[in-house]
Image (cartoon, grey):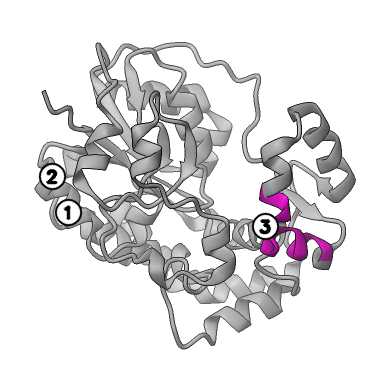
Amino acid sequence: MLIKPNFFIVGAAKAGTTSLYKYLDQHKGIFFSPIKEPNYFSSDINPSEFRADYRNHTEIVGEKYFNSKPLRELHLSFVKEEKYYNQLFEKAKTETAIGECSTSYLFSDVAAKNIKEFNPEAKIIAILRNPTERIYSHYLMGLRFGYTTKNFREAIEEDSQQTQKGWGISKLYIELGMYARQLERYFNIFPKEQIKIYLNEELKNNPQEVISDICTFLEVEDFELDLSQKHNIASIPKNKMLNKFMYQSGLKNAVDGILPKTLKSKLKLFFYETKEVIPINEKDKEFVKAIYKQDITETAKLINKNLENWLL
């Protein structure tokens, strides 16, 4: 019997989706795809067009991956064939909530329509982050993965001037924080009762409350969260050029594949400066707020939440 996912965490990228996923994955009644982000419904995203550094960091799976059981857990891939996508959920047994978490679904022009055609009863969850914080977190990820060695302002301006735009093609620093138009695609075709929008600050300040509300939404029993682990703590390379070489040469992935976990942790401390919060400076903050001011106003009306603190 074909098992279909019945809920989707659609983004936003760098807004807290990994934490949300990790929390919900603790629930015995919730099944997640072994590939956290299969990106199947973003059919307008073509991996053959990815820029080299993004392609090197992205494992595109195919027959070899799906023939090896149980399926290996992956953070990100781009599954293009329906028969393979269906296999991601075939191990679901007694779970009543079956889902996946692909952040490209919020940005994609067609993902909302594709999900609706696949499962009209699907429930949609999105988590949004202050776009000033989101763009800076995105930039820090770019530093960590060797996508850029430039300072924040230079990296943003360089990407905004790119003539070719798209997921995996350009960085989309600014575009991924323009929530209003992206959310409208879901509100235009899904009933409001099938959509839940949360804010990153709500998840940070009251994780149990948010997860309990999602449990009600997904019609699964509430449970007590294990909050002992932190997810996606920010880190920046101590040597940007060396870090970029490690990633782009493939040496970073090769080392990760052979070194024991304890040694990798020690090397991370050597190569990276790790902090829970790496703040944006005030000058850059004002620059970004001006970009997002109108979209924040439109987003607040759309989701019926007070977002005035995003403008402070």
The mark that comes first in sequence, 1 or 3, is 1
**Which stretch did the figure color magenta?**
242-253
How far from the left and from the top, in percent, is residue 127? 42, 45
In the image, which disc is placed on residue 114?
1
Q: Nearer the viewer, residue 187 or 144?
A: 144
Distance from disc 1 to disc 3, alpha carbons, whole Å, reads 34 Å
How far from the left and from the top, in percent, is residue 39? 34, 50
Disc 1 element: helix
Q: Amino acid at mark 2?
A: Phe
Is residue 245 shown in magenta? yes
Q: Is residue 42 above or below residue 173?
A: above
Is residue 216 shown in magenta? no
Q: Amino acid at mark 1?
A: Asn
Question: Is residue 203 rendered to the left or right of residue 299?
Answer: right
How far from the left and from the top, in percent, is residue 308? 49, 57
Q: Quadrant of residue 262?
A: top right
Q: Quadrant of residue 298?
A: bottom left
Q: Are marks 1 and 3 in contact (CB under 8 Å)?
A: no
Q: Is residue 140 above or below residue 264?
A: below
Q: Of circles 3 and 2, which is in front? A: 3
